[in-house]
Amino acid sequence: MVKKRKNSGKGQSGNNTSIQCSKCGRLVPRSKAKRVTRPTRLMEGVIAKELRQSGAIMPNGQSSRWYCVSCAVHSHTVKIRSSADRKKAGKL
Ligand SMILES: [Zn+2]
């Protein structure tokens, strides 16, 4: 069976909560939105390098952004799959 979304578009109870796209601000259902998590720098590169050389342990920062399908496709986060590929099971 073809599945569009991981949870078949249903949340745990009732309606999906809406999430605002980080790029265009459109409201999209949480199950439909694409989440991108990227590491962030907490300090400047030169300072971080010096601290690393002196033996300090650096904390890693992460920031996650939610995108609507249009913005995810436009920013090459998600690729458009052919109709045959869409029927294959795999990562949704
Ligand atoms: Zn968007």
Image (spheres, grey):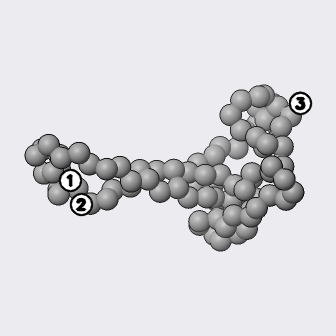
Task: State the image coordinates of residue 44 (x, y, percent, origin top left).
Answer: 24, 60
- SS assignment at label 2: loop
Query: How far separated are the C-alphas under marks 3 and 2?
Result: 49 Å
Residue at image point 70% right, 69% down: 26
Per the image, the residue denoted by label 2 is 44
Find residue 3 and name its label. Answer: none
Q: Amino acid at mark 3?
A: Met
70 sits to left or right of 11: left
Q: Is mark 1 within 8 Å of ligand 1?
A: no
Residue at image point 69% right, 64% down: 19
74 sits to left or right of 29: left
Residue 17, quarter of the rendered image: bottom right
Of callouts 3 and 1, which one flags the residue occurring earlier in the amino acid sequence? Answer: 3
Of callouts 3 and 2, which one flags the residue occurring earlier in the amino acid sequence? Answer: 3
- SS assignment at label 3: loop
Residue 85, quarter of the rendered image: top right
Per the image, the residue denoted by label 3 is 1
Find residue 48 and name its label. Answer: 1
Q: Amino acid at mark 2?
A: Glu
